[in-house]
Amino acid sequence: MSVEPTAAPLRLGLAGLGTVGIGVVRILQREAALLSARAGRPVAITAVSARDPLKNRDADLSGYAWETDPVALARREDVDVFVEVMGGHEGPARDATEAALRAGKHVVTANKALLAHHGQALAEAAEAAGVALRFEAAVAGGIPVIKTLTEGLAGNRIKRVMGVMNGTCNYILTRMEETGQGYNVLFDECARLGYLEADPNLDVGGIDAGHKLALLAAIAFGTRVSFDAVELEGIGAISLDDIRHAAEMGYRIKLLGVAQMSGRGLEQRMTPCLVPARSPLGQLQGGTNMVVLEGDSVGQIVMRGAGAGEGPTASAVMADVIDIARGFRLPVFGIPARDLAEPVAARAATPAPYYLRMRLLDKPGALAKIATCLGEAGISIDQMRQINQEEAEDDDAIVLFVTHKASPADIEHALGEFERTGVLVEAPVAIRIEQV
C-alpha cells in the first residue's frame, strides 16, 4: 500500500560533492517518490556546499542554493539535517558538524575519522540538543552494521566483533594470491585505480579500518570510543611468500579487525591474520567488506557487502536520513553518551595458533635451537615445514611453523629468544591465526 506524504518536507544541507555526495544527489533525484513514501514526508536537498561551484560533477545541481563555507550551510534556516560527506577529523568537517549541532540540526555523516577522534563530545552535544547524530555510512559502506548492533542485536550481550573493513587492503591481498604480483606492484595499481586515500597510510597502515573498529567496539560494549587504544599493524610487511605459504596450508591472510571485552579490559586490534581459507572471511575477495558479530543469544551472524563507493555509501546515508524523517531517535552509540563507560585498554592476550616464518643459516643444529626456544617458551608445534632449497638462498633454509595455541606474550618472548641463537638470517615473521 502506498503512503501519501502530507507532512512538511525534511530539508537537507549537503556538505561535500565528491563521490558520496553526488551519490546522495542521484538517489534523491532518481527515487524522490519512493523515498517520500517510505519516510512519510518529502525529503529534499535545499542547499549544498563545495569549494568550487563551477566544477563539472556530472549531476544537475542547479536547483540548490550554494555555500562555499560548510559552517554557513550548517546554520541555514532552511536546513533540518546537515549531511556531512567531506571527510577529515579536523577543520571544516568538525567545525561544520559542531555548528550544526549547536544550531539544533540533525547530522548524518559518513566520516569515521571525525567520530573516532571526537565521537564522545559530538554524541554528548547531539543528545543535549535533542537531535540525531547518525553514521551508518561511516562503517563498512553499504553494510547496515550500525543498525544491526544498535537495533537488531539490542537484546544480546555482544561477545566479539570481527571483520575485514578496508576494501583496498583486501583487494591487494587477494590480488597478490591471484596474480603472484608483490605488494609494491599492487599498491601502485591501487593508486592508478583511485582506490587509495589521499594519505595512502590511512588504508594500507590499517588506520581507516581501525577507525571503524573503534566505533563498532563502542556500540558493542557500551564504552566511549577509544581509537588510540587500537593495536594497529598494516599490510606493508606481508610478502608474496607469506601469501603463498599460507594458501598451501589452507589459510588466507586478511587485515582483520577484532574487538572483544575480556577480564582485563577492552581488546581492539587491527592486524594481519591468517584465517581458514574455507571460512566466510577466507573466501572474501576483492574490495568487499565483511563484518562478523557474535552475540550470547543469536550466536554468530555474518554480513558481507560493498565497503565503499558511490552507491553503497550514499545508500547508507539515505537510510539514516529516512530514519530521521520518520521521527526515529536513538542515542548515538546505542545508550546515552553520559552512560558510556571509560574503557580499560587491554592488549590481546587470548591464546591462538601462530604462523611463523624464518630464514635460518643452513647449518647443523640451527633448527634444533629454534625448536628449543619454542619449547622453553611453552609453545608446542602443530606443523613444521622446510621450504625446498631452490626457493632459498645458497646458505639459507626457510622454515615454517604453525603452533598450537599460544599467548601473544609467549610468542613475543620466543621471538626475542630467536634473536639470541645466532642462526637467523633476517627477522622472523609471526602472524596470528584467528579462529572464525
Image (cartoon, helix red, strand yellow):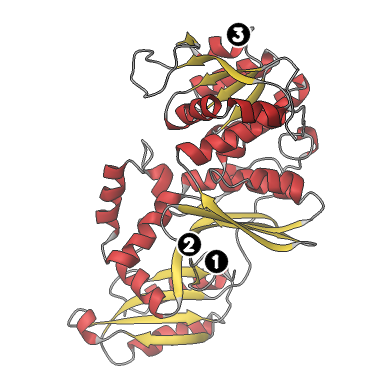
Residue at the outermost bottom position: 364
Residue at numbered disc 2: 284
- The answer to whether residue 245 is visible is yes
Image location of residue 397, percent across then percent down? 27, 83
Front position in the image: 87 or 32 = 32
Residue at the outermost top position: 77
Mark 2: which amino acid?
Leu
Q: Residues within 10 Å of mark 2 (few under 14, many from 20)?
A: many
Mark 3: which amino acid?
Arg
Could you say whether the residue bearing mark 1 is in a helix, strand or loop? loop
Residue at numbered disc 1: 280
**Image point (26%, 86%), residue name:** 388
Q: Where is the C terminus found, in terms of image quarters?
A: bottom right
Could you say whether the residue bearing mark 2 is in a helix, strand or loop? loop
Q: Where is the N terminus found, in terms of image quarters?
A: top right
Q: Residues within 10 Å of mark 3 (few under 14, many from 20)?
A: some
Mark 1: which amino acid?
Pro
The quarter of the displayed image where residue 429 is located = bottom left
Numbered badge on residue 392: none
Image location of residue 182, percent across then percent down? 27, 61
Front position in the image: 16 or 54 = 54
> In the rendered image of this protein, does residue 177 appear above or below residue 398?
above
Numbered badge on residue 76: 3
Instruction: Give the alpha-carbon distance from disc 2 to disc 3, as whole Å.
Output: 44 Å
Instruction: Give the alpha-carbon distance from disc 3 to disc 1, as whole Å.
Output: 46 Å
Proximity of marks 2 and 1: CB atoms separated by less than 8 Å? yes
Image location of residue 66, percent across then percent down? 47, 10
